[in-house]
Amino acid sequence: MPDRIQQEIEELLARLEHFPPRRPLWQRLTNPVVRAFGGLRRAVGSIHLPRISAGHLLLLAITVIVVGYLAIETKDIARWVIAGGIVLFIVAFVLSLRRSAGGGRPPEKYWRDRPLDLRSRPQGDSTRSWWDRWRGRR
């Protein structure tokens, strides 16, 4: 028993001799500053800003067009505001056609932590087509 304890003590002392090398002075001085800014970035990152969807942009574009048509009296400014509203509407419409970021495919559906294959049909007589059932009678 004492030999085992002595062996463990020697292993621990051998590990102490191989401590990581001391970091340079510049790195030790700048590390707290970097950590402080990292904490600030996390604090600012925790503020949740509202998400703007393509539908919101479409409503904004229609509002800009209507306000430009009805409320602005100067014809030149009204034209530019209406043109900007039309451009915003087109951009929002194109963005609304885009699906998820996964290459235009809808997100995969899961059931009990397993992906569902919605394209395959379950096996059974009632789910077979009438032609398959007719051929199976022979």
Image (cartoon, rainbow, N blue to C red):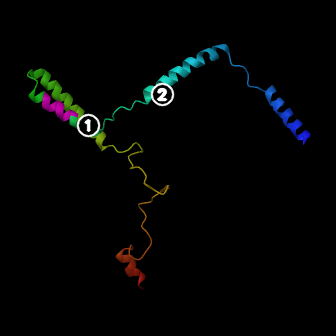
Q: Earlier in the sequence, mark 1 or mark 2?
A: 2
Residue found 42% across the figure and 67% down from its top: 121
- Is 62 contained in the magenta span? yes
Q: Which residues are magenta?
A: 60-67
Give yes or no for contact between labels 1 and 2 (Cβ–Cβ under 8 Å).
no
Amino acid identity at mark 2: Arg
Disc sitting over residue 93 in the figure? none
Up/down of 56 relative to 119, above or below = above
Relative horizontal placement of residue 65, taking residue 42 as reference (left or right): left
Name of the residue lying farthest toward the bottom? 138
Which dot marks residue 42? 2
* Of the pair 52 and 89, the residue shown nearer to us: 52
Location of residue 129 by image quarter: bottom left
Q: Which mark is on residue 56?
A: 1
Give how far across and how far down residue 10 sits, in percent.
86, 33
- Which residue extends farthest front? 2
Amino acid, disc 1: His
